[in-house]
Amino acid sequence: MISLDTRNHEPIYIQIEKQIIKLIRLGVYEGNTALPSVRAMACELGVNPNTVARTYKSLEAQGIIYTIVGKGVFVSENNENQLKAMAVKQLKKALLEAKNSGIEGQEAINIVNTLWEEKSND
Amino acid sequence: MISLDTRNHEPIYIQIEKQIIKLIRLGVYEGNTALPSVRAMACELGVNPNTVARTYKSLEAQGIIYTIVGKGVFVSENNENQLKAMAVKQLKKALLEAKNSGIEGQEAINIVNTLWEEKSND
Amino acid sequence: MISLDTRNHEPIYIQIEKQIIKLIRLGVYEGNTALPSVRAMACELGVNPNTVARTYKSLEAQGIIYTIVGKGVFVSENNENQLKAMAVKQLKKALLEAKNSGIEGQEAINIVNTLWEEKSND
Amino acid sequence: MISLDTRNHEPIYIQIEKQIIKLIRLGVYEGNTALPSVRAMACELGVNPNTVARTYKSLEAQGIIYTIVGKGVFVSENNENQLKAMAVKQLKKALLEAKNSGIEGQEAINIVNTLWEEKSND
DNA sequence: GTGGTCTAGACCACA
DNA sequence: GTGGTCTAGACCACA
């Protein structure tokens, strides 16, 4: 369910992180259920366990997952609000850049309308 | 006119690039006029000439500036459309991510309205 | 009477250990009376018996409990002084660190006063 | 200036972290001056560069230092307040544990008085 | 078995 | 030269 693009300059551990967040958002990984172990995930993705461990550490630092040493890594409960807040924050940053690039509010709204009319795609 | 934030993890050459683009957009650097030489710009900003050279290379690769060997670096003419298209493309990408993160169109529009009401800030 | 916080990174066996010490201090477990067996305690807490065994081993190494093979695990007599001494030692260590971090004696006393005014909380 | 105790169960990267914080507090490393590079520090301490990198990442996450990729790692300015707040927080936690261990406020104050009378030692 | 730490060392972007 | 990422793999505490 997770695909890596090694040509992409985005670090692998970030690519994994983003896709896990998406999977949590979609409900594939539910609250308090275990994620694949570091080793299992690493094996599945064909990357080094250290790389997955880095992803998990980052997600834990954000409160999205929690680890129990010796038991595994688990999805935090009720992180909907948190994920939403992260998305809003990113959107604001992007919109501010767009504004600074000379895009008018009406243009931005037009783009929003066009994109949200289409069917959702992941 | 260009300010660098060394604490920001955005590479220096990208920070310079973005601000040159903004200055071109604002008309500070006009079509077919010369930009400061690599050395002059580097000296003014207190950075390594290699860094400015990297910025200019990137801008040239995008067609925003052009080099005349032995004479200097010049702003391309009529790159308004191009700069606009770049900004729109970036915005679309960001909005698509927001949509995939579960943000509703109306929410996005509300954020747009809030941000564009405020006074322009750089 | 013992509650575990799996999200806390403090190892489970240490959490159990601290709470047993507190229960002994509070007189819930009295001298020469038996603690629940490893299996009973593990079952009650929903943890692996190995984990409880580790706790008991640690408590025995500190002389707080003793084992009679085939009969069970018992609370040592007269360990008040010992528990007190342990607590004082830990406190001294923490205060020394605080002092080395530049905290003034008066500040420390103020914090003490604030904390001891409040109602005891576990 | 930094000494490691490999027998100590405290991870090396944490030991380094604590000692760098102390050196910053003591003014050995001043604001906006560079720390030894990852490689230099690793060489000096006889540890792997990755270990030092982990320390620096952690310090950066706490805002105590900042890195400029390609240039080095620098001490943040004005982190006195921050370092102080960290120390106070740690002290509060330790005092709360002491209180829960049955230590009386007056005893804690006595220990404070005893320790702060002595000459400061690092 | 599970995550955490650490080594040894490679390659990369950046300044 | 500087930090960032990644691999390969070892050893450890913990459950």
Image (cartoon, coloured by chain):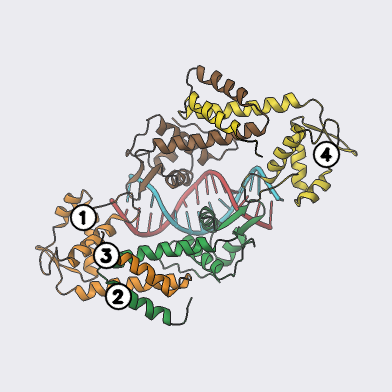
Chain colours: A brown, B yellow, C orange, D green, E cyan, F red
Q: Nearer the viewer, mark 4 or mark 1?
A: 4
The image quadrant where one finds the C terminus of chain C is bottom left
* Residue at the (14%, 53%) spot, across then down: C40
Label 3: element kind: helix
Within the image, what quadrant is residue D93 found in? bottom left
Label 1: element kind: loop
- The answer to whether the residue labelled 3 contacts the one labelled 1, judged by CB atoms less than 8 Å apart, is no
Q: Which residue is mark 1?
A: C2
CA distance for labels 3 and 1 = 15 Å
In-image side of C94 versus A12 (left or right) = left
Q: Observer-nearest residue: A11 or A39?
A: A11
Q: Which residue is mark 4?
A: B35
CA distance for labels 1 and 2 = 29 Å
How crowded is the residue under tag 4: few (<14 C-alpha within 10 Å), some, or many (20+)?
A: some
Q: Residue D22, how many percent across, how many down? A: 52, 68
Q: Residue C11, how many percent across, how many down? A: 31, 56
Amino acid carrying label 2: it is Gln
Label 4: element kind: loop
The image quadrant where one finds the N terminus of chain C is bottom left
Q: Which residue is mark 3?
A: D100
In-image side of C77 versus C8 (left or right) = left
